Amino acid sequence: MADTRKMDEEANRIGEEVQERTQRMGRDYQKAVERGFETTTRSFSEANRGFQAMAAEVTDFSKRRWEDVFHAWEQLLRARHFGDVVEVQTQYAQRAFEAYTSEMSKLGEMCLDTARSVSKPVEDATRKFR
């Protein structure tokens, strides 16, 4: 009878230990899922912020380019000689090239910054698991 009682107590202890471990694993899993969701939310938020900044930059660039186009047309309409027309077109082409190359460089940097900021929450989350 004493052996039966010891076995019963041991079985209860093992059962409680397994239940406690299972509950702890469930809580750990739930925390990991919550962190993953928070990380994903922060990443998407950063991506959205970056895309909005790029959209605003492209909009501003487009406005500036239209202003430059209209300015060039005004100069072309005032031109009296063929040499003046060539000069206006040459200046416009130089400004347009410089503006486009500068803008593409700026947008490239913005894309890189967005990628960095999007990946930062993921990097931070992976450091927590190590």
Image: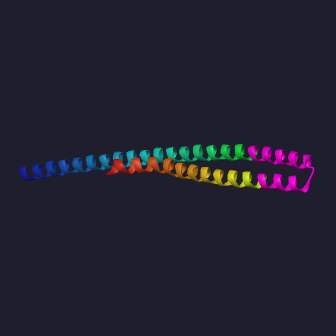
Q: Main secondary structure of the magenta part?
A: helix
Does the stretch in magenta take in 81? yes
Q: Residue at x 87, y 55 (%)?
A: 83
| Left or right of 2, for residue 66 | right
Q: Whole-percent x and y of residue 90?
A: 79, 55
Q: Nearer the viewer, residue 21 or 10?
A: 21
Q: Position of residue 66 (x, y in %)?
A: 79, 46
Image coordinates for residue 35, horizontal then vertical, percent: 42, 45
Percent from the top left, x then y, of residue 47? 56, 48
Q: Residue at x 42, y 48 (%)?
A: 33
Q: Give the residue displayed 37% in from the left and 49% down from the top.
A: 29
Q: Report the number of numbered marks.
A: 0
Of residues 20 and 115, which is closer to you in this image?
Answer: 115
| Quadrant in the picture for residue 60 | top right
Q: Residue furthest right?
A: 80
Judge by depth and name the residue closer to the eye, 97 or 18: 97
Is residue 21 found left or right of 82 in the rendered image?
left
Q: Nearer the viewer, residue 77 or 48?
A: 77
78 part of magenta stretch: yes
Instruction: Answer with left or right where residue 55 lies relative to residue 13.
Output: right
Tell me the magenta residue range. 63-91
On screen, residue 7 above or below 57: below
Colour convention: rainbow
Residue at 54% across, 45% down: 46
